[in-house]
Image (spheres, rainbow, N blue to C red):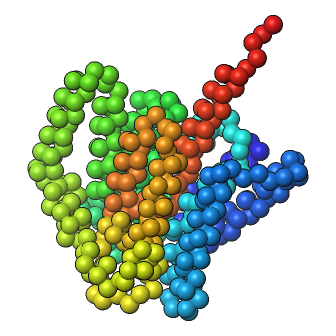
Amino acid sequence: MKLFQFAVLPFLFTHWIGPALLTGYLGFLVILLSLRKNLITKTVKINQISFIAFLIIIIFSLFNLSNIFNGIKLNLVFQGLYLYLNIFLMFILFYFLEPWNLKNLQIISKIIFYIAFFSIFVEFIAVNFFNISNEIIPSYKDIMSYKLPAAGGFYRPFGLTGQSSVNGGILLFSFLLLNELGLLKFRFYILFILGSVCTVSGQAYLCAIFTLMILLLSNIKLFAVRWSFAFLFFIFFFYLLDLNLFQKISFDYLIYVLIQKANIGITLSHLNIWQIAFGTLGVENIPLHDGLSEVYLISSIRLNGVIFTIFLWSFIYFIIRKTRHKYIIFSSIFLSSLHYPSIIYFEAQIPLMLLYTHSNLKKSVIKKTIYKKPAN
């Protein structure tokens, strides 16, 4: 089983290999591992949470049967199903990969962080300083905004996903995973900051600044000192945004993306009560297509509905609820999905599953310690 646990690493290259192939690979692993458990234990037990994840998959699919079989925009429908359900599928896969040990968990966590970093850094250096074409990157997208230099005159790395903000989110989640495992050393801080800078993404910059500052504050034990530093941090943060030194770190940019481009009315006003509650997967006729919201939470309501959006974020909170810094981790996940949703990518979900695995591994170790028979 230990060898099978390294089988999660190919999911980091979903956008290099292709999501359809990797989804098939996921299904193959689940079937193979369930058969393996069946042959060894003579029964396949599934825990309560995995059952809930499976139940959400079934319910979400049933509520979207009309969208699946109406024959309209089928590619869009199946893409919507895939993007919503993959986190639940990944959770079920990790259940079948149990039992984990701390050594394997630490090795895989470090590998994920280094892959996330070097996939950003190496491409950034190669394209911006050695004039190597960014079109050789497997996640290359034929979009003008990616083919041309971003603000500051630098090309943004396509990296693992083709989306620089999401690449920053993967690096952030893997950094938080190392922190939870107690593996953070000075070099990881440097690599995290350097990798975040190389994304040339405002969302990645803001999330990195927020996470580093909040983690720093969480290590201060004295209440008065902690809140004094918190006040100074927020003053500094607002001052930094007000300086407008960089286009993507400014009040103007935040107002543009989160308010002007929220387009709540255009995105949701044409939906009926059922569609607002349970989503449309994008098959509805959309007036002013170019005016759709660029805020993921609003887009999620349109695609998945209010109820299933609540299910998704409740499940995310459940995954990290036993971690040492659950509120920091949840806030970082939410912020990294405000504009470009890091959370719906396989590549970003693996560190979260390992966070859940580690929190349960700690619980298992504690139980064994408590109930260990005393030596005679």
Residue drawn 51% across the image and 39% down it: 322
**Above or below — where is 99 with respect to 156?**
above
Q: Residue at the top extreme?
A: 376
**In which quadrant of the rendered view does residue 374 lie?**
top right
**Above or below — where is 307 with respect to 288?**
above
- Which is more toward the observer, 11 or 271? 271
Give the percent coordinates (x, y) of residue 45.
Answer: 77, 51
- Which is more toward the observer, 93 or 264? 264
Residue drawn 39% across the image and 42% down it: 327
Residue drawn 31% across the image and 79% down it: 267
* Residue 143 left/right relative to 266: right
* Residue 47 left/right relative to 178: right
Give the quadrant of the C terminus: top right
Residue drawn 21% across the image and 60% down it: 254
* Residue 173 visible, this angle: yes
Give the percent coordinates (x, y) of residue 161.
Answer: 48, 63
Q: Residue at the front extreme?
A: 273
* Residue 165 left/right relative to 227: right
**In which quadrant of the rendered view does residue 18 lie?**
bottom right
Give the percent coordinates (x, y) of residue 341.
Answer: 40, 62
Give the quadrant of the N terminus: top right
Give the percent coordinates (x, y) of residue 40.
Answer: 87, 47
